[in-house]
Image: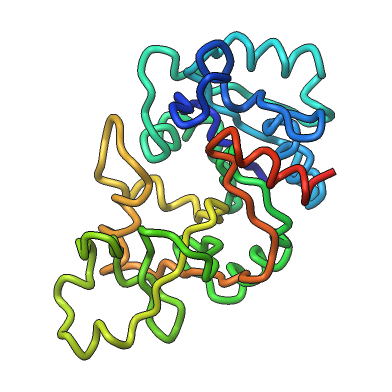
Amino acid sequence: MKAMIFAAGLGTRFKPWTEHHPKALALVNGKSLLQRNIEYLQQYGITDVVVNVHHFPDQIIEAVEVNKGWGSNILISDERDAVLETGGGLLKARPLLEDDEPFVTINVDILTNLNLHQLLAYHQQHKPLVSFGVTNRKTARNFLFNANDQLCGWRNLTTGEEKGPVLTYTADEKSQLVAKAYSCVVVFEQRFFSLVKQTGKFSLTEPYLDLAATHTILGYDHSGDVLVDVGKPESVAVAEAYFD
């Protein structure tokens, strides 16, 4: 099985580090976020990993080469010409990810102890187009799920804005939905690529919400697991409390 680590972001919330370095190389207890996620995937036997780069790409490429991929086979998807966000980045990496099996993606600034074997078993059991981790942690922007854990939409809890199939729901139907936070650990079927209509720069949220009306996209609830979004410098201390 192959995986992709999204590492191309500008890391604007992670300044001043990202004024001179990519966020992927920020250290948590002496190990970079990139190394930690490569080693996380290794725990589950995944050693063929695509890493996309844009912001200070040469630093990431050098780190991979100097450390011999930390024991994994690392392929670089070069986005130095234009950052494409998660959706566009995934499509650009398609030639590197195509295989006979599903593949996994994770954001480089997410550290978690989610049991990937359990997420993969869930995906294998239910056979959706996409399965991704979700939790009940507090966040302003949530995905909405029905009683069968099927994606039905998206909601900004601050503004009330909604997107996706939920826009066609009655007030009663909406009241039955459960809001959960996206964990950025995802299992995709290969056919996802051929179904995406977006091009260029776009977030994966867009095809998720487009395809949720006609395809099964499931949220795997792993509330209770450790998950730290190392999106800001102050998040490093939080992550260091959980990850040695």
Residue at left 70%, top 41%?
237
- Looking at the rendering, which quadrant does residue 156 occupy? bottom left
When the figure is inspected, residue 7 is found, relative to residue 225, above or below; the finding is above
Label total for image: 0
Please provide percent x and percent y for residue 77: 53, 23
Please give left or right for residue 120 compared with residue 7 in the image.
right
When the figure is inspected, residue 144 is found, relative to residue 80, above or below; the finding is below
Quarter of the picture containing the C terminus is: top right
Please give left or right for residue 243 compared with residue 175 in the image.
right
Please provide percent x and percent y for residue 175: 28, 86
Q: Nearer the viewer, residue 90 or 98?
A: 90
Please give left or right for residue 207 compared with residue 63 in the image.
left
Q: Nearer the viewer, residue 100 or 199?
A: 199
Residue at left 25%, top 41%?
198
Please provide percent x and percent y for residue 201: 30, 31
Please provide percent x and percent y for residue 8: 49, 26
Residue at left 46%, top 31%?
13
The colour scheme of the drawn protein is rainbow
